[in-house]
Amino acid sequence: MEEDVRLMKGNEAIAHAAIRYGADGYFGYPITPQSEILETLEAEMPWETTGMVVLQAESEIAAINMVYAGAACGKAVFTSSSSPGVSLKQEGISYIAAGELPALIVNVMRGGPGLGTIHPSQADYFQATKGGGHGDYHLIVLAPATVQEMADFVTLGFDLAFKYRTPAMILADGMVGQMMEKVVLPPARPRRTDEEIARQCPWAVTGKPATRKPNIMTTLELDSYQMERNNERYQRTYRLIEENEVRYQEYYTDDADYLIVAFGSIARICLKSIEEARKQGIRIGLIRPITLWPYPYKTITGLSKRIKGILVVEINAGQMIEDVRLAVEGRVPVYHFGRLGGIVPNPNEVLDAFKHNFPEAQ
């Protein structure tokens, strides 16, 4: 089969990939810098070709609750927003996690806090990886660095969500959402029939005959002991995900004396910094976590036993650095460099920050 190669924005790639995945529904609300997801879906009109529902809800809260309802029926449904919009969705995300339902949430981050700017940021790391809503729950969090990954992670996110019956999030920043690159779109999948959904998702609310008790989806449990058992079941699922779904990329780590850890689009900038550093005789490696949860603790722990220090680079005031420090356990110094409010550092700034924190490396 001939590849379908396009030049498009990261946001557009998400929309096209969702249609080709055979998604049953999208429910969202426009907010910069992710509005092209909804706009592209509306332009493509998949309701005429695949039967996919595309609905601009009256609010972010309405959108996430529509996702909750669709997921309860075993449908492949998703939503997208940007930082303050995802904040509004947090209660619904917690409900979906407690209901053990598969769903995909896309967050194209912008500068904050508050309404902030419309420029790129990575300051929603805590919100995504630590459970921004209430209760002890996790999301599977995928951090794309390219437009190709924006498309690929739609399939991966949906597949993992259904495999573990838990929500997954694509945590992108405004830069990768808005940049244009070549992308190979995935082949189209047929949407599942209601019979296939009933067979694959026996837990789903599928409209059983009146003579049978229908499945009821609720996250309310008045018995504290039962709620504890529910939480124990969630935790078993999370441990399984941690054992099987950690993803990351390594660059130049075989001979590295130092390490940079960065995710998303900033990792691409850091790679340029590292290439320049190596021309100057400074051996730096890069770890790019792809799953921000589950996090590649073991890999960073292993590398920390033979390197001299780590610089964590993020477009925020320092969030992922907490996980890096947990992995390192004090073996080597760990420093942070980041820009705030939607400003993206360039490779020279990153290299200067490295030299400032590790002058002995020069």
Image (spheres, helix red, strand yellow):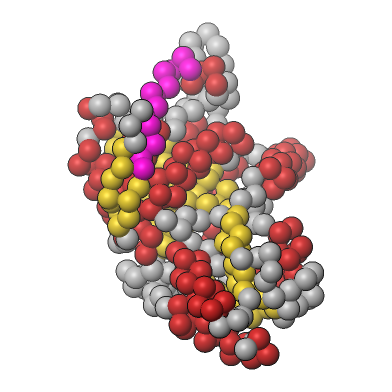
Task: Say whether residue 188 is magenta.
Answer: yes
Q: Position of residue 232 (x, y in %)?
A: 75, 42
Task: Place residue 31 in its image quadrant.
Answer: bottom left
Task: Left or right? Give the position of 247 relative to 9.
Answer: right
- Relative vertical location of residue 13 with respect to residue 47 in this rendering, above or below: below
Task: Say whether residue 96 is magenta.
Answer: no
Q: Residue at x 47, y 55 (%)?
A: 144
Task: Left or right? Give the position of 75 relative to 357.
Answer: left
Q: Position of residue 254 (x, y in %)?
A: 68, 64
**Quarter of the figure with the N terminus:** top left
- Relative vertical location of residue 199 with respect to residue 48 in this rendering, above or below: above
Q: Is residue 316 visible?
A: no
Q: Which of these two is toward me, 154 or 107?
A: 154
Extreme-top residue of the structure: 211
Part of the protein shown in magenta:
184-196
Q: Position of residue 27 (x, y in %)?
A: 35, 42
- Relative vertical location of residue 80 with respect to residue 76 in this rendering, above or below: below
Q: Residue at x 64, y 45 (%)?
A: 245
**Quarter of the figure with the C terminus:** bottom right
Q: Residue at x 59, y 56 (%)?
A: 249
Q: Residue at x 31, y 60 (%)?
A: 178
Q: Position of residue 28 (x, y in %)?
A: 34, 47
Task: Place residue 318 in its image quadrant.
Answer: bottom right
Q: Is residue 152 visible?
A: yes
Q: Which of these two is toward me, 332 or 199?
A: 332
Our reading of the magenta stretch's main secondary structure is loop
